Image: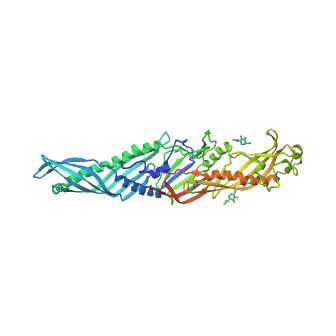
Amino acid sequence: MVTSAGTLPSLLLGTLLTFTFGALGANPGLVVRITDRGLEYVAQEELLALQSKLHKVTLPNFDGDVRIKHFGRVDYEFHSLNIQSCKLLGSALKLLPNQGLHFSISDSFIQVTGDWKVRKRILRLKGSFDVKVKGITISVNLLLDSEPSGRPKIAVSSCSSHIHDVEVHMSGDLGWLLNLFHNQIESKFRRVLESKICEIIQDSVTSELQPYLQTLPVTTKIDHLAGLDYSLMGAPQATAQMLDVMFKGEIFSLEDRFPVAFLAPVMNLPEEHSRMVYFAISDYAFNTASLVYHKAGFLNFTITDDMVPPDSTIRLNTKSFRAFVPRIARLYPNTNLELQGAVISAPCLNFSPGNLSTAAQMEIEAFVLLPNSVKEPVFRLGVATNVSAMLTFNTSKITGFLEPGKIQVELKESKVGLFSAELLEALLNYYLRNNFYPKVNDKLAEGFPLPLLKRIQLYDPILQIHKDFLFLGTNVRYLRV
Ligand SMILES: *[C@@H]1O[C@H](CO)[C@@H](O)[C@H](O)[C@H]1NC(C)=O
Ligand SMILES: *[C@@H]1O[C@H](CO)[C@@H](O)[C@H](O)[C@H]1NC(C)=O
Ligand SMILES: *[C@@H]1O[C@H](CO)[C@@H](O)[C@H](O)[C@H]1NC(C)=O
Ligand SMILES: *[C@@H]1O[C@H](CO)[C@@H](O)[C@H](O)[C@H]1NC(C)=O
């Protein structure tokens, strides 16, 4: 076998990985774009991989007969063929608009050694030989598609190989004689090799690469709550400069996947192609994540007096509230309070050029803590805040960070008389900055995984924020082990 899942378009695979069919016609939440520069790099890598694999190829024995003047017919056999050296020089991976990819190798050279045997009646001779195969050209068209099962499909739609020149040199008894009819042997050799090359390529795609694609997972787990759906939303689209692969890019609840009530927006991707790979991540990915975490109660919180800093002048007890809510201290003397907060609806991340922000509306209900674990509601607050978000990415993930803005507190309902809710602002600010945001930021720091193979390293990253999506470009380096 020359190629395997680990070689042919393995790097490409890193980005093509994982798939089920998304609803056709819907917009993708994630687009991976591989540019011509990226393909150039893949071609180089594949060439090196192919070159090292070729050393392990077993070539078939072959035999035949030749007529030699004044001597008659002799039967010969070549065996123990061994690839001694192999130099694949030019390789290219180009886009075939609306189809897939064209992979070619040109100007390559292989040197094979082996043993020969010749039989003529009772005469038996043997020796060794050395073949130089020059000017090898291979041209393969790969058709990329997606299967009804939702997985990607790759097929060889055409393959041809040509060898410019074969030089055979025999040594041993009668080697001089065999060298006289090298033309015949050379053309036979050429035919065997030419047909073998495409057979190997075809075989590795249909019996290794394609079955491998069938085993790929469709989703990946982010944490105990959420998974990411990387399903392919249709056949990868090739144009002259880039290959765009559309993924669903939806974050869903592992426990109970619910249908998302909004659609992914259309992403108008810039025409940029200075980097090898681009990822366009729609706000859909972030907002579906927000739904999952919101629904799981991750954005609910409870504040009790022991969480209030010791030097705070306001404590979460009725005594401390006496000054501004006199009735509370009269009704519940020396009683602790508890604030239960929830973000009202899943916050949406807004992407505008160069900027990321979100607005959170929270509701906080205050309870007095009575004996026997009885909690009695006393007032309800509305809290609004604008939050700016920052995104970065390191070698494999997009990570986020929320920078809290000023909060506005409003009294919504009170069973203990009206009071100015602003008095609670400092306390809430303290809590949100020290407990709530750090918890959310820890989650955001765990990041959004990019669909990459483990051994791919990113460098020269750029990150742009466009309307409704994040656009990330990077060069990649494949780390060989
Ligand atoms: C979060 O808090 C809200 C409001 O108190 C409540 O309705 C909701 O059930 C809570 N969610 C979870 C998962 O605890
Ligand atoms: C980003 O958005 C925030 C909130 O909408 C706004 O205050 C700020 O000026 C914006 N920054 C830029 C660079 O547009
Ligand atoms: C949040 O931003 C919106 C729009 O810029 C503004 O109307 C609102 O007052 C802001 N809210 C807070 C709490 O700053
Ligand atoms: C990238 O970020 C993730 C999540 O924060 C972290 O686990 C990983 O170590 C980081 N990698 C590097 C190279 O900094």
Name the image quarter holding the C terminus. bottom left
Instruction: Residue 410: give x, y in percent of width and height.
Output: 80, 50
In this rendering, position of residue 310 left or right of residue 271: right
Identify the residue shown where x is 78% and y is 53%.
427
Up the image or down, 44 lies above or below 212; here it is below
Q: Residue at x 28, y 47 (%)?
A: 60
Res. 171 image quadrant:
bottom left
Residue 419 showing in the rendered view: no
Colour option used: rainbow
Front-lying residue, 481 or 300: 481
Whether residue 13 is visible here, answered yes or no, is yes
In this rendering, the count of numbered labels is 0
Classify residue 86 as left or right of residue 475: left
Give ligand 3's quarter of the image: bottom right
Q: Whole-percent x and y of residue 386?
A: 72, 54
Comparing 6 with 242, the one in front is 6
Viewer-proximal residue among 176 and 420: 176
Q: Residue furthest left?
A: 70
Left or right of 315 in this view: 222: left
> Horizontal and vertical percent for residue 88?
35, 57
On the image, the x and y values in percent for residue 9 come to 43, 51
Would residue 107 be found to the left or right of residue 418 on screen?
Answer: left
Residue in front for this viewpoint, 14 or 116: 116
